Amino acid sequence: MIKIVVDAMGGDNAPGELVKGAIEAVNERSDIGVILVGQEDVIKKELEKYKFNKDQVEVAHASEVIETSEPPVNAIRRKKDSSIVVGMNMVKKGEADGFVSAGSSGAILVGGQVIVGRVKGVERPPLAPLIPTKKGFSLLVDCGANVDARPSHLVQFAKMGSIYMEHIVGIKNPRVAIVNNGAEEEKGNALVKETFPMLKECKDINFIGSIEARDIPSGYADVIVCEAFVGNVILKLYEGVALTLVSQIKEGLMTSLRSKIGALLIKPALKETLKNFDAAKYGGAPLLGLKGLVVKCHGSSKSIEVKNSIIQCISFKEQAINEKIAECLAVKENIEE
């Protein structure tokens, strides 16, 4: 059984949606064990609402909570009994196979590197969410961990992203592109111009050149490489446009009797189409390049994203992604099973 620690106190909807998502995961999969970490009395009160196999669910007490407004480094150092620190220490000690949290992004990024630790050879672990496209989905790497990345970091992002897409998603020889303000090789800022030829020379990735933001939703590339400032803007704009479009479509369909009748006719097909563009179905964003698995969910995550984040940990563990990353970077590192 694969054991996943869930930070029950992290995020806007904690502990309710976090506990609910954990229970949905264990009720769907018998090969998952969940450790809910946080304030024990609060978690147990939430658990009373559900029916589940008690052999699959544990509660680990953590008296403190790291708030999103706290400086990440200070919070990790001072709040040793916080749900994030306690949960990550379980992964570090091999008591759990992964850690899922919707809590403070900064604390998760700092804790991942300081507590869980980087795979030897990894310069900067990136956050890598799957984003929906016309052809399925693509991996956006980095979306929030490294706002001042160097060219060598982006090359590693490309390699780690390729490993993830090939072994977790099942895409052979995934297409890698770097975000740019034009398709031409000479376009871009200093970072892109310096990174482009390095990616071009990289033999272990399928680099296809630049990708403009407008081509991302079409599924032009499987792995989309950028530094975190650009990646986070892309991700947030993606989400905002999607919410606005859905809202406008619903509003438009309710403007007249004719449109309401039409809405009833197209509702099943529209609902199925929009479901493919729901980012929650893909789970959270793994922090690639760590010695253990750390997954960051949206702060506003509902139970469906929490559940899918837990389930995605199974493939990550079974496919030994950390080991493959170490091997790809030509580093011999002993990584605990």
Image (spheres, rainbow, N blue to C red):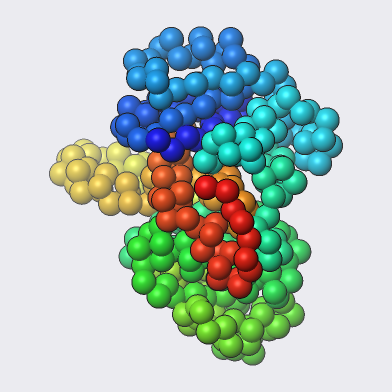
Rendering coords of residue 109 (x, y %): 69, 47
Residue 119 falls in image quadrant: bottom right
- Residue at (70% x, 75% y) in the render: 151
- Residue at (49% x, 21% y) in the render: 58
In this view, the residue in front, 42 or 180, is: 42
Residue 91 falls in image quadrant: top right
In this view, the residue in front, 181 or 226, is: 226
Rendering coords of residue 54 (x, y %): 39, 17
Determine whether, in the image, residue 74 is placed left or right of residue 115. Answer: right
Rendering coords of residue 229 (x, y %): 68, 60
- Residue at (46% x, 49% y) in the render: 317
In this view, the residue in front, 147 or 331, is: 331
Determine whether, in the image, residue 335 is placed left or right of residue 165. Answer: right
> Is residue 100 visible from the viewing direction of this image?
no
> Is residue 291 visible from the viewing direction of this image?
yes
Query: Which quadrant: the N terminus?
Result: top left
Rendering coords of residue 335 (x, y %): 59, 53
- What is the tally of numbered marks visible in this picture? 0
Look at the picture and state if 58 lies above or below 135: above
Look at the picture and state if 186 lies above or below 176: below
- Residue at (20% x, 49% y) in the render: 269
Look at the picture and state if 190 lies above or below 232: below
